[in-house]
Amino acid sequence: MPSLEWSDALALELPAMDDTHREFVELLAQVETAADSALLDHWRVLLDHTGEHFTREDRWMQDTRFSSTNCHSVQHKVVLQVMREGLSAAEAGKLETLRHMARELALWFPQHAQTMDAALALHLRGTGYDPATGVVSMPEALPRDIIHGCGGASCSDDAQPEPAVPTAQAA
């Protein structure tokens, strides 16, 4: 039985995000229940999905003036790096590494979704952002300056230019 199952507690009322999260939970369950002979293949599918998932959320943050290096994006980078390291260990025959990582991801994901992703979903809805088109229908609701994540020096992105923000009028 998987450690994590989809529930309404994980829903963030942003269909594009909820669909991706539901897929993540399903793919993680497939990893957890996979036979040793199929484990690496399932992990690779989960890793590819997670990379696309995080890239999409990072783009949404950039489109709506969240810093591209804020704590949310940094967490994405760290999780992907750890997942890649797990893949390398498993390719070297250490399958238990992936099994342990899958259990840890099942613990990490609800907290990430209910905090960082919930804040992002609220922000996206508040700006009228359409994840499918990248259009902001309420540009007046965008923050004036890029949002910096945790406020620490490691979350600074002063050298990065502001992204162009497509608006409903320009679309």
Image: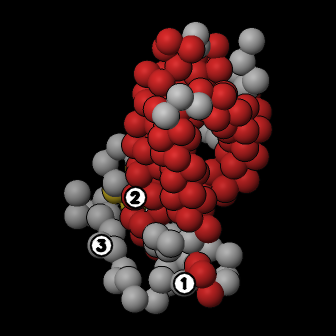
Q: Position of residue 129 (x, y in %)?
A: 44, 55
Relative to residue 93, is residue 150 depicted above or below? below
Looking at the rendered structure, which numbered label has been put on residue 99? none
The residue mark sitting in front, 1 or 3, is 1
The residue lying at 35 percent from left, 43 percent from top is 132
Q: Residue at x 67, y 45 (%)?
A: 113
Residue farthest toward the front in the current orientation of the protein:
92
Across and down, in percent, residue 89 comes to: 54, 39
- Residue under the point 59% across and 31% down: 94
Q: List the residue tagged with mark 3.
A: 164
Say which element carries label 3.
Answer: loop
Residue 4 lies in quadrant = top right
Q: Which quarter of the rendering shows the N terminus?
A: top right
Please tell me which residue lies in front, 58 or 34. 34
Which residue is label 1 attached to? 156
Amino acid carrying label 3: it is Ala
* Mark positioned earlier in the residue sequence (3 or 2): 2
Q: Which residue, given by chain and number where applicable, does mark 2 sit on? A: 59
Residue at 76% over, 24% down: 3
Q: How is the image coloured?
A: secondary structure
Query: Disc count in the image?
Result: 3
Q: Quadrant of the C terminus?
A: bottom left
Left or right: 53, with 167 as reference point? right
Task: Classify 56 as above or below 38.
Answer: below
Work out how far the residue at label 2 is from the one at label 1, CA to CA, in angstroms: 17 Å
Amino acid marked by disc 2: Arg
- For the residues labelled 3 and 2, the Cα–Cα distance comes to 12 Å
Badge 1 marks a residue whose secondary structure is loop
Q: Amino acid under label 1?
A: Ser
